[in-house]
DNA sequence: CGCTCTTA
DNA sequence: TAAGAGCGG
């Protein structure tokens, strides 16, 4: 089902914000926003973040709360947004639609179950729920005013972020998702949204640890199960790696166990050869317009000042601090 | 998602 | 020792 099983294979090391200063992190925007959307909206009244026109803008509260973390540690985020399906190839559109329908079926099932599992429903909702047009627009609007760079992915934001990191245009991918490893992101930071230091996930070290190639790692993951397929019953991370060592690749391993995984080759390609673009550009030098950003959030989008005061304060302090640092 | 417990 | 179910956050 999920891909938390990958944690068992991943080479993870505690990281310290102190060592991350000056680095650039390509952040999967959907993943990042969603973490704040679920917590912010769920544990407070969602009314507080709805405009008089009925637009939900909890994303603005979440973003203002989450951004100071980067500023305070002198880490430059580059947010990578998912692309619209209109720009994708036809077969890619079909795949996405199938995937989406899968999730929606699962969600319906989970909701209809005799004993409704709230956690599962929440997880599935997070995968089926698209960010609304307003959330897309207002998040970019806030980033524009804060001069925080962002990039538009042709398809999956996480794949684009991994691509940028692979080509050295970002030092890290920022995501909570272990999929970043399958997408070949050299270094991934997890835990950028929670308090405390993040952890670093190392791609090459992971391959070395298990004596696998990138293809082999992806094949093992497909055997265990990914977001795009159910794994083989009774096969966990350890067995999967063993099977790839014994049989060479996914198809041989499946043949040996007389199992099949529909569209196995397509699933591999989702990780090994995803739709990405080289047509991106960003300026990591950030010169935020704090007043403009505040007006945008509290006046234009009617978010109560009390909800974002502290966040803007923290951003302001870190900007002032950065200015002072240049003279010391 | 992470932790813990149960089962093979 | 590995896999998977169950549960809390």
Image (cartoon, coloured by chain):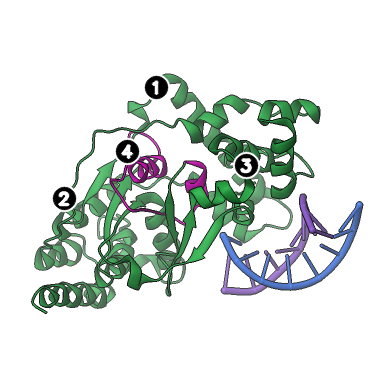
Chain colours: A green, B blue, C purple
Secondary structure of the residue carrying tag 4 is loop
Q: Nearer the viewer, mark 2 or mark 4?
A: 2
Q: Earlier in the sequence, mark 1 or mark 3?
A: 1
Residue labelled with disc 3:
A221
Magenta residue check for A163: yes
Count how many numbered circles sit on residues in the image: 4
Secondary structure of the residue carrying tag 2 is loop
Residue A105 in view here:
no
Closer to the camera, A209 or A109? Answer: A209
Q: Nearer the viewer, mark 3 or mark 4?
A: 3
At 57% across and 48% down in the image, what residue appears? Answer: A208
Q: Nearer the viewer, mark 2 or mark 1?
A: 2
The vertical placement of A32 against A163, above or below, is below
Quadrant position of residue A311: bottom left
Q: Earlier in the sequence, mark 3 or mark 2?
A: 3
Residue labelled with disc 4:
A153
Give the chain of mark 3: A
Residue labelled with disc 1:
A89
């Amino acid at each position: 089902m999920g891909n938390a099983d990958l944690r068992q294979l991943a080479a993870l090391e505690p990281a310290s914000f102190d060592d991350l200063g000056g680095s650039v992190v390509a952040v999967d925007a959907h993943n990042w926003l969603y973490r704040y959307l679920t917590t912010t909206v769920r544990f407070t009244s969602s009314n507080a973040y709805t405009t008089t026109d009925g637009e939900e803008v909890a994303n603005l509260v979440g973003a203002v709360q989450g951004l100071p973390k980067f500023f305070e540690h002198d880490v430059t985020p580059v947010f990578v947004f998912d692309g619209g399906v209109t720009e994708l190839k036809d077969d890619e559109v079909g795949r996405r639609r199938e995937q989406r329908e899968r999730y929606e079926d699962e969600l319906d099932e989970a909701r209809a179950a005799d004993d409704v599992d709230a956690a599962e429903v929440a997880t599935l909702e997070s995968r089926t729920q698209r960010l609304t047009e307003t959330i897309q627009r207002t998040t970019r609007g806030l980033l524009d005013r804060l001069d925080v760079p962002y990039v538009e992915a042709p398809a999956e934001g996480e794949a684009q972020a991994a691509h940028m990191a692979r080509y050295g245009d970002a030092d890290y991918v920022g995501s909570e998702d272990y999929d970043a490893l399958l997408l070949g992101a050299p270094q991934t930071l997890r835990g950028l949204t929670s308090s405390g230091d993040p952890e670093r996930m190392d791609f090459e070290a992971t391959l070395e640890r298990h004596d696998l190639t990138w293809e082999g790692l992806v094949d093992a993951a497909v055997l265990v199960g990914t977001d795009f397929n159910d794994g083989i019953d009774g096969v966990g991370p350890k067995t999967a790696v063993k099977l790839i060592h014994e049989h060479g690749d996914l198809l041989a391993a499946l043949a040996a166990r007389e199992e099949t995984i529909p569209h196995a080759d397509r699933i591999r390609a989702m990780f090994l050869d995803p739709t990405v673009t080289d047509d991106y550009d960003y300026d990591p030098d950030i010169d935020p317009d704090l007043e403009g950003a505040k007006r945008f959030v509290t006046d234009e989008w009617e978010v109560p000042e009390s909800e974002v005061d502290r966040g803007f304060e923290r951003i302001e302090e870190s900007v002032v601090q950065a200015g002072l640092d240049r003279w010391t």
